[in-house]
Structure formats: structure tokens, C-alpha cells
Image (tube, rainbow, N blue to C red):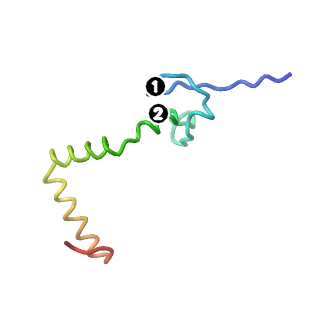
Amino acid sequence: MAIAITKMQKCKRCGESKPLETAFSKAARCKTGYRKTCKQCMREGINRESASAASKLWRDHNRERANQYLREWRKRKAANGTGSER
């Protein structure tokens, strides 16, 4: 009689122990081979509004760096012929 043993892992975000192979996405770079955050928390954590707000906050605090990056990006795009120069 064989007993199936399910490996469990604790999610670093919600703190719940869940089945490793079904609740966590694979990640070759992680020691266990799976992400530390469960799939459910990953879905809940992806929020465009908060990411957009964080990006805007960074641009506001680093205006000169952001402007310099955009100038260089526009030059590269124009040199490659893959976009229009403003």
C-alpha cells in the first residue's frame, strides 16, 4: 500500500502552508524550484494602479534621471528607425 506524501511550502506573503506542486509556480532560480509566493497571492499582488502610482512617484523624485532616460531612448528609437521622434 503506497501512501502519497504531499510536500508543503509556506507562502511568504499570506503565511499559509499549501501543496508545493499545485499552489506554487515553478521557478528554476529558486532553491526549491518553486516561487516563495503562492499563485493566489501572486494574482492578488499584481495591481496596475499601485505599480503605476509607484512609477509616477519615482519619476517625481527622480525627474532629471527620468528625462535623461527618455531623451536617450528617443535617440535610440530614431537611430533604429523604429519610431517617430517627437
Q: Earlier in the sequence, mark 2 or mark 1?
A: 1
Mark 1 neighbour class, 10 Å CA radius: few under 14, some 14 to 19, many 20 or more: few
Whether residue 59 is situated above or below residue 23 in the rendered picture: below
Side (left or right) of 11 relative to 74: right
Side (left or right) of 7 relative to 37: right
Q: Say whether marks 2 and 1 touch (CB < 8 Å).
A: yes
Q: Residue at x 19, y 49 (%)?
A: 59
Side (left or right) of 21 relative to 48: right
> Residue 57 bears which disc, if any?
none
Circle 1 residue = 14
Q: Residue at x 64, y 26 (%)?
A: 7
Circle 2 residue = 41
Foreground residue among 29 and 2: 2
Q: Residue 56's x, y, as percent?
A: 22, 47
Secondary structure category for the residue under label 2: helix
Q: Quadrant of residue 57?
A: top left
Q: Residue at x 30, y 73 (%)?
A: 83
Q: Residue 25's x, y, as percent?
A: 55, 39
Q: Quadrant of residue 17?
A: top right
